[in-house]
Amino acid sequence: MKPIFIDLKIIADARGSLVAIESLKNVPFDMQRVYFIFGLSPSLRRGQHAHKKNKQVALCIQGQCTFLLDDGHQKTEVILKSPTQGLLVNEMIWHEMFDFSADCILMMIASDMYDELDYIRGYNNFLRMTKDVHSPIG
Ligand code: TYD
């Protein structure tokens, strides 16, 4: 699968740089939640789930990490290391984050409020659900 990047504009002047993120403008959904993770261990993975409905944009606003995206058929890995390069993580995409730099701050912009029922945990469950969705015989 091909990653979809969202390039954000930098507004810079002598005082420094600013990046603005707006619903349905540079984020392709109406955003309802922002959260960020930091103090991450380089040897531990996060994510390891998919969402049934929630769409997200991931941004490494400091440092870097690797993102694995998997639609149940194809996988791709990308390194996020720019505060202006967002990665779209659509619904029904298994994602894992790892290889965090010590200074990594990973910001996630989400279309939906937090809802544990929206999570698909367990890779085999995910594969079963994507198989159901894409199977020609239903
Ligand atoms: P989780 O989504 O599993 O983290 P990650 O995808 O980074 O590995 O969430 C970790 C914990 O935080 C879990 O107990 C749920 C809680 N949580 C919230 O309360 N609100 C949120 O918006 C998120 C994303 C997680």
Image (cartoon, rainbow, N blue to C red):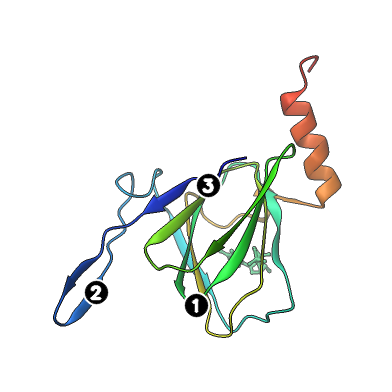
Residue 74 image position (x, y, % from top left):
71, 40
Q: Residue furthest right?
A: 124
Query: On the image, which quarter does residue 95 sit in?
Result: bottom right
Q: Is residue 29 left or right of residue 38?
A: left
Q: Give the residue type at disc 1.
A: Gly
Residue 63: assigned label: 1
Mark 3 = which residue? 55
The nearer-to-camera label among 3 and 2 is 2
Mark 2 = which residue? 17
Indicate which disc, 3 or 2, sits on the residue closer to the N terminus.
2
Q: Give the residue type at disc 3.
A: Lys
Q: Is residue 94 left or right of residue 86?
A: right
Indicate which disc, 1 or 2, sits on the residue closer to the N terminus.
2
Q: Secondary structure at mark 3?
A: loop
| Crowd rating for badge 3 (residues with CA inside 10 Å; few <14, some 14–19, many 20+) | many
Q: Secondary structure at mark 2?
A: strand
Indicate which disc, 3 or 1, sits on the residue closer to the N terminus.
3
Q: CA distance from mark 3 to mark 2?
A: 27 Å
Q: CA distance from mark 1 to mark 2?
A: 16 Å
State the quadrant of the N terminus: top right
- Ligand 1 is found in which quarter of the picture? bottom right
